[in-house]
Image (tube, rainbow, N blue to C red):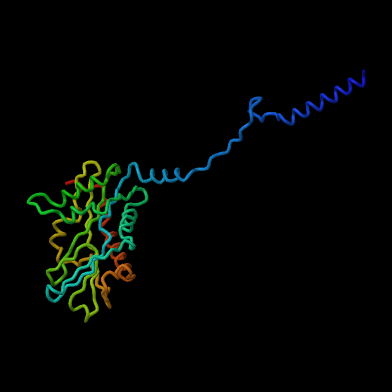
């Protein structure tokens, strides 16, 4: 009888051990009969990062910058007669002039002012630069409409728009518009050129889109316009015009001189346009 009882106890121990191996105890927090689940922290996805970038470009801002000078560089020649005049517009997107304009606005505004670049379609300013002929209306009205349309929901307090303007080539009836280089019929002998960066700045109220008064358009400035040096133009000595004109995009001297002249011009006039005290017209 004792032998039989001992044998029964041994068999019972084997059965318990076998059950323990096939049915492990649940981990802490798991109910009996359930398998514990290991929780692993999820890593941020690329979509989350993209959302953060998008949100940084949205919401309220103080100054919205619209650099609408275009990505073209004028290679111009004024001939001895009208038949010698030539003008070629060369694409110069790699020069990054519009990015540089935004950077100069940020520098002039200071770190405490939020500045955002406002993107726009390539042909957005076509109606402003090439308006249809009409008896009434002006390009200023079309500029305000364009700015209001492309600003969308940007929610900026002000919009600072940089557009092309123009000037007259001294001693001739020819004009220079935007950003480029000009030579004349005698440049071949004297090896000279003139680099120009004619731009205009307009500031609009971010809510009414009323144009703010131009702080540089004063009676005194208009009276002395022909008496002071034009700081939008710079003489280039020992200059050979690019041949063909399309080669201008790869001309490091033209690129660097253009960026330097444009930076100098912007740094001189931007503080006046960033002054909050200016009134709307």
Where 118 falls versus 232 (above or below)? above
Looking at the image, residue 251 lies above or below residue 102: below
Residue that appears at 58% across and 38% down: 40
- Please state which of residues 97 and 45 is positioned toward the viewer in this rendering: 45
Q: Is residue 248 above or below residue 220?
A: below
The residue located at (18%, 79%) in the rendering is 186
In the foreground, 52 or 109? 52
How far across and down, in percent of the image, does residue 194 sit?
A: 23, 71
Query: What residue is shown at x 22% (from left), y 59% (from top)?
Result: 164
**Which residue is situated farthest in the left direction here?**
135
On screen, residue 32 versus residue 84, left or right, reads right
- Residue 101 drawn at (x, y percent): 30, 57
Q: Which residue lies most toward the bottom here?
A: 189
Quadrant housing the N terminus? top right
Q: Would residue 147 be found to the left or right of residue 106 on screen?
A: left
Q: Position of residue 22 (x, y in %)?
A: 72, 30
26 vs 100, left or right, is right
| Residue under the point 24% across and 76% down | 192
> In x, y percent, where is residue 51?
41, 43
* Residue extending farthest right: 2
- Residue 34 lies, with reference to residue 210, above or below; the image says above
**In the orientation shown, which residue stands out farthest toward the top?**
1
Q: Nearer the viewer, residue 217 or 50?
A: 50
Q: How many marks?
A: 0
Of residues 145 and 84, the one nearer the viewer is 84
């Amino acid at each position: 009888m004792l032998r039989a009882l001992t044998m029964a106890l041994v068999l019972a121990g084997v059965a318990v051990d076998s059950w323990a191996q096939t049915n492990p105890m649940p981990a802490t927090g798991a109910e009996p009969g359930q398998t514990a689940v290991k929780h692993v922290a999820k890593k941020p996805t690329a979509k989350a990062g993209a959302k953060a970038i998008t949100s940084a470009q949205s919401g309220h801002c103080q100054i919205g910058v619209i650099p609408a000078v275009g990505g073209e560089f004028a290679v111009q020649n004024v001939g001895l007669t009208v038949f010698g005049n030539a003008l070629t517009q060369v694409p110069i997107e790699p020069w990054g002039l519009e990015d540089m304009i935004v950077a100069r606005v940020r520098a002039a505004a200071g770190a405490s002012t939020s500045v955002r670049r406002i993107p726009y379609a390539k042909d957005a300013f076509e109606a402003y630069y090439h308006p249809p002929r009409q008896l009434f209306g002006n390009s200023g009205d079309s500029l305000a409409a364009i700015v209001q349309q492309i600003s969308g929901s940007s929610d900026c307090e002000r919009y600072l728009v940089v557009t092309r303007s123009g000037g007259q080539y001294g001693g001739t009836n020819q004009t220079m518009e935007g950003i480029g280089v000009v030579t004349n019929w005698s440049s071949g002998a004297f090896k000279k050129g003139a680099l120009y960066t004619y731009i205009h700045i307009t500031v609009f109220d971010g809510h009414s889109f009323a144009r703010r008064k131009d702080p540089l358009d004063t009676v005194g400035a208009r009276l002395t316009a022909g008496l002071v040096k034009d700081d939008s133009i710079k003489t280039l000595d020992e200059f050979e015009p690019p041949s063909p004109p399309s080669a201008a995009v790869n001309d490091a001297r033209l690129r660097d001189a253009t960026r330097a002249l444009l930076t100098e011009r912007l740094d001189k006039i931007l503080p006046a346009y960033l002054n909050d005290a200016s009134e709307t017209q």
